Image (cartoon, rainbow, N blue to C red):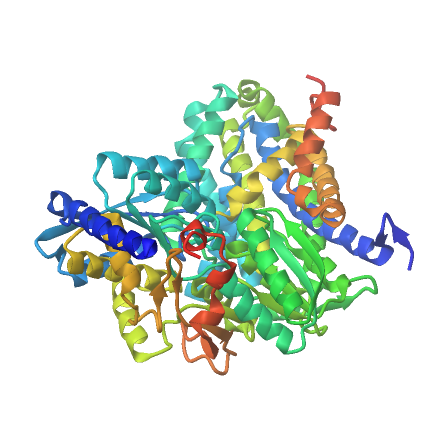
């Protein structure tokens, strides 16, 4: 068998595949952050909590109302998105225009409260959510066993990422969004309701996080703290991609998934640090990130 | 002759010291501090429900030992050794706490027992894994109840090797407790005729195990052992199921699983996994009766740590009652001299090094067909006798033991 740095090629191919799957997750999560920061200049530290809520709502809907996975895939993001609208309307709106640090502290505090309350109710051992029957099993690719569900995650995550990028960068609605957040007074003058656009954008970013949460529900341990574990990594991805760059967040997400996957193969103990190492190097060479616009 | 004289003198001296060391309860209050992770990763297996178990023990004493009131204070250690040592110091130095119970993260316990020793009080560690707590870090001021790495390795690893699992791949969480467990398991595997072909250390916490499970599959080992716990173990077991690890003929061994984690996984996913436990709520009528009371109070079934906290507190309060003292050395000696047979332990006793040894059990998670209810999770496969389960004193490096050899 051919070897690459002492690792069989088959194993390496498997790890690349895993890297892309995890990267798709990172892309989806960092995309929401990038949308919220890019358009609203809000540093959303509640993003991890929204991801967690997406997963938790999926489980609760199933336990209480037997809502199945496919319905949850739409309903959970809508419910969590609506919750995001409330946060935007009652909290974030009051600090609009202030320094970034205010939105960071506010959303961080909100996340801690949400997490703490839910920990008291659900504990930390993790809730159970069964894999939908049609995704049980997998396919043998020769170099690895690919569970059907992971294949689905790649496909759907990339579709959603591309769709979001397309809407924001290529459509008329997207141009309103970008213009409205650039100069809201001018937009108001053209008869467009800018505050509504801001609310909806925040709600949409939150929906993306919740959507990732639903995707995570069948494969990860669902606990109130699951979001805080992944949030910092996702922030690093956004910073590497260039704060606010939509396309940058997607590409960097996948790239970081792959780099992390390779580190898990060659030197596992460093796998939780490697993304931050990349971040340091990138910031030294390009302070605005890989795809960030020059300030 | 000289020896006899010496020992006679020692006897008189110790009698004087003992009678001098306040054979009374200081300020007429027995104050117990409960320190544990109340909000983080280890919340469910010890946490607030451990405090409930402690309160049950105090209630069973009617809130009093003799004439003295029993008081409880509690704190969240946030899994931080710094928080733990400053809290314990405040309790012991300013708030007259006599005994500290609970403890989960080994790093927290190791930091706190130093402070307890400095103040010559008593600590009863129930939730920690490190066997070094009563080995190189032993002291005359603490006791280690419930379990440590040694019985986990002896119980699970030996059983799995005997069933034909010869080559091992160990996936270890990258902190000291994980390393210690990995070392203990490796030596048991090799002593039982097996071989560890690879060990791999994963960061704490790891949300996604697919990469590691893939490597475990590629290793071709008979057994994939998980030297981790909590969300890490749950994620790893789930991912192993998803990637068809056991279908392809490999065996999954979880070295430290608590009831709350198996409950979270469910019998569908966890069925057949073998694990070592000190106690199971449904293992005998006495355990069941206590677990029912616990369920009434908390709404969940207790883990072995919850039961251990209750048992050790009762044992402590009995010792305080019998000696009429809350002096750490008098009480500890009494606890060592009294065997433990209760709803928790069979053939239990506390050794000189502070290790509580008792019969442990090899359990297997039931299949969905066998399980009659939400918490009907284990069947006991084998009893591991106390002498076999714990590190023998002949291998101990604890000065309390080696100085008397």
Where residue A95 sits in the image (x, y, percent)?
Answer: 44, 23
Q: In this view, does B24 lie to the left or right of A133?
A: left
Q: Measuring from the top left, give residue A71's x and y in whole percent.
A: 54, 60
Determine whether B235 is above or below B176 in the image: below
* Image quadrant where residue B223 sits: bottom right
**Nearer the observer, B35 or B321:** B321
Q: Nearer the viewer, residue B6 or B365?
A: B6
Q: Which residue is drawn at the image coordinates 43% and 51% (left, top)? A: B403
Q: Quarter of the image containing the C terminus of chain B? A: bottom left
Residue B277, position as x, y percentages in the image: 45, 68
Q: Foreground: A224 or A68?
A: A224
Q: Which residue is drawn at 58% across and 44% down?
A: A208
In the current view of this chain or complex, which residue is farthest to the right?
A2
In the image, taking residue B39 as reference, residue B181 lies left or right, namely: right
Farthest residue in the top direction?
Answer: A295
State the residue in front, A170 or B241: B241
In the displayed structure, would residue B176 be above or below residue A63? above
Q: Taking B362 as reference, is A183 above or below it?
A: above
């Amino acid at each position: 068998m051919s070897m690459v740095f002492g690792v069989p090629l088959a194993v390496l191919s498997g790890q690349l595949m895993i890297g892309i799957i995890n990267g798709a997750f990172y892309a989806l999560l960092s995309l929401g952050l990038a949308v919220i920061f890019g358009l609203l200049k809000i540093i959303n530290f509640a993003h991890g909590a929204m991801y967690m809520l997406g997963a938790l709502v999926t489980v609760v809907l199933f336990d209480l109302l037997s809502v199945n996975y496919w319905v949850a895939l739409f309903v959970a993001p809508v419910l969590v998105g609506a919750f995001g609208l409330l946060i935007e309307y009652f909290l974030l709106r009051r600090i609009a225009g202030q320094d970034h640090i205010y939105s960071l502290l506010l959303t961080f505090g909100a996340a801690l409260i949400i997490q703490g309350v839910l920990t008291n109710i659900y504990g930390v051992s993790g809730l159970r959510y069964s894999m939908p029957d049609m995704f049980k099993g997998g396919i043998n690719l020769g170099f690895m066993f690919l569970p059907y569900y992971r294949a689905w995650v790649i496909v759907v995550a990339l579709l959603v990422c591309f769709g979001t990028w397309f809407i924001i960068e290529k459509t008329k609605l997207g141009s309103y969004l970008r213009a409205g957040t650039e100069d809201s007074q001018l937009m108001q003058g053209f008869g467009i309701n800018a505050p509504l656009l801001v609310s909806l954008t925040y709600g949409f970013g939150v929906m993306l996080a919740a959507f990732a949460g639903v995707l995570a529900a069948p494969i990860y341990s669902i606990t109130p703290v699951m979001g805080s574990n992944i949030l910092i990594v996702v922030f690093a991805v956004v910073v590497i991609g260039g704060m606010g760059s939509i396309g940058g967040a997607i590409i960097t997400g996948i790239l970081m998934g792959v780099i992390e996957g390779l580190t898990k193969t060659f030197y596992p103990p460093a796998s939780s640090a490697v993304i931050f190492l990349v971040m340091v190097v990138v910031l030294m060479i390009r302070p605005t990130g890989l795809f960030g616009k020059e300030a | 002759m000289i020896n006899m004289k010496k020992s006679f003198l020692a006897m008189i001296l110790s009698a004087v010291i003992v009678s001098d060391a306040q054979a009374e309860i200081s300020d007429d209050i027995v104050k117990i501090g409960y320190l544990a992770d109340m909000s983080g990763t280890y919340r469910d297996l010890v946490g607030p429900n451990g405090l409930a178990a402690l309160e049950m023990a105090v209630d069973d004493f009617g809130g009093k030992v003799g004439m003295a009131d029993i008081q409880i204070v509690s704190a969240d250690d946030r899994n931080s050794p710094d928080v733990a040592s400053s809290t314990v110091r405040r309790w012991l130095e300013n708030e007259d706490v006599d005994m500290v119970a609970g403890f989960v993260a080994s790093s927290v316990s190791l930091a706190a027992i130093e402070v307890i020793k400095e103040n010559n009080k008593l600590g009863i560690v129930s939730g920690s894994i490190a066997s070094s707590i009563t080995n190189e870090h032993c002291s005359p001021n603490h006791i280690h109840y419930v379990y440590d790495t040694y019985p986990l390795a002896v119980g699970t690893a030996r059983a799995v090797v005997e069933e034909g699992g010869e080559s091992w791949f160990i996936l270890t969480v990258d902190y000291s407790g994980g390393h210690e467990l990995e070392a203990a398991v490796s030596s048991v595997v090799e002593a039982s005729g097996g071989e560890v072909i690879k060990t791999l250390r994963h960061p704490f916490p790891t949300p996604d195990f697919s990469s590691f499970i893939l490597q475990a599959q590629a290793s071709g080992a008979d057994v994939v052992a998980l030297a981790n716990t909590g969300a890490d173990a749950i994620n790893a077991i789930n991912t192993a199921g998803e990637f068809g690890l056991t279908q392809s003929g490999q065996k999954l061994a979880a070295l430290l699983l608590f009831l709350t984690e198996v409950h979270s996984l469910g019998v569908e996913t966890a069925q057949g996994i073998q694990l070592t436990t000190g106690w199971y709520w449904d293992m005998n009528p006495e355990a069941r009766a206590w677990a029912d009371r616990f369920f009434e109070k908390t709404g969940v079934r207790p883990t072995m740590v919850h039961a251990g906290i209750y048992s050790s507190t009762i044992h402590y309060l009995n010792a305080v009652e019998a000696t009429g003292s809350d002096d750490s050395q008098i009480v500890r000696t009494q606890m060592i001299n009294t065997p433990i047979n209760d709803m928790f332990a069979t053939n239990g006793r506390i050794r000189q090094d502070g290790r509580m040894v008792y019969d442990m059990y090899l359990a297997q998670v039931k299949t969905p067909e066998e399980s009659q209810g939400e918490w009907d999770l284990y069947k006991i496969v084998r009893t591991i006798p106390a002498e076999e389960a714990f590190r023998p004193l002949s291998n101990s490096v604890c000065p309390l033991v080696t100085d008397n050899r």
